[in-house]
Amino acid sequence: METINFTRGVPANESFPLEEVASAAIDALKARGPAMLQYGPSAGFGPLREWIAQWQGVSSDRVLTGNGSLQLVEFLCLALLKPGDVVFTENPTYDRTITMLRRHGMQVVGIPLDADGPNLTALEAVLVTQAPKVFYLIPDFQNPSGTTCSAEKRKRLAELAEQHNFLIVEDAPYRPLRYRGKEEPSIYSLAPERTLFMCSFTKLIAPGVRTGFMIGRPDLIAKLAKVAEDTYISPGYLAQGITYEWCQRGLLQPQIERLKALYLPRLDACLAALDKYMPGAVDARPDGGFFISLTLPEGVLTSTVRAEAAKRSLNLSDGLAFFPNGGGERFLRLPFCALTPAEIEEGVSRLAQCVEASRG
């Protein structure tokens, strides 16, 4: 029986623009080889920062590039936070961010997540007694839930950040990957002085480029860049130079359109299979991103289902890691992008069998 992996949210191998990247690498080295192979400013490779600034409609002194978004979260911990500071996250949220925050001694407080974003009633109640320095959010096609924050909630979050003097970290790696429907405004566009916006080329080109970026106030970017300098002098200019060459050729938007054409049928296949084999289990029906989440029936635990899944060559993630303050015993995240529609249907069919076997 073929093993099916509903575990990590990785891009499909067939999505990688291999020939384009190879050509960009050769031409980038010919044109800018010494600059790409030498040390440079810690804020990142200048031409790429300028390109990102133009793409995002900001000045380049608001742009920091690094070796992936998670490293930028670590720089945030070192530059703007101190051990004991309170950081809010959605509950659930990206498990590696929870790990990173706790590694640096932060008090992580999870705010319940609804189908349209953080529960504002719960958030405002917690703000009465807790004073966060940062609220870390994934407002577009959230990892792990797949939910997208509504425009109304984004506006209210921007207002609360101003009223309660906290920063919003808007982690948006899936924002360009909307397969249908209307894009919501970024929180950064609503509160640019209160928001650090993060995105990455990992999901758009390939994880191997290890290039993420952050946009924010110039004074905050400067503090983060100083930590970057003290950490690695400068990021991977070779990867950033190749990324720049690839982007400046006008290849990003066509690549995004290819990704949409590849991933939308997989999203639809996953939703259809869940409706067929596990009706009513889906927590949110996303219009983009990499993930669908579901809640198992009462009395059925993720740990039990995972044990049953192992017998059926089905790999599932532990839902507990996504919940900073407990919970998640019946939560499952299903990444769909790296599987074919046929693999997805077979995987969901096996999952339904595992759930039934776990009821007894």
Image (spheres, grey):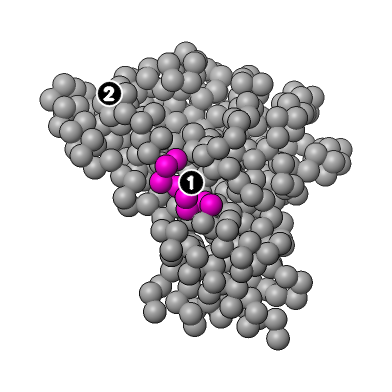
How crowded pointer 2 is (Cα within 10 Å; few <14, some 14-19, many 20+) is rated as few
Residue 359 included in the magenta stretch of the image: no
Residue at horizontal 48 percent and vertical 80 percent from the top: 312
Residue at the limit of the structure toward the bottom, as seen here: 360
The residue under the point 47% across, 53% down is 266
What SS does tag 1 mark? helix
Circle 2 residue:
249
- Residue drawn at x 41%, y 46% is 262
Which residue carries the number 1 mark? 264
Of 151 and 54, the residue lying toward us: 151
Please name which of the two marks, 2 or 1, marks the residue nearer to the observer: 1
Q: Position of residue 287 (x, y in %)?
A: 58, 43
Q: Position of residue 260 (x, y in %)?
A: 44, 40
Magenta stretch: dominant SS? helix
Query: Label 1: how many residues lie within 10 Å, few (<14), some (14-19) or many (20+)?
Result: many
Dot 2 amino acid type: Arg
Q: Quadrant of residue 128?
A: top right
CA gap, disc 2 to disc 1? 26 Å
The N terminus sits in image quarter? bottom left
Residue 13 at least partly seen: yes
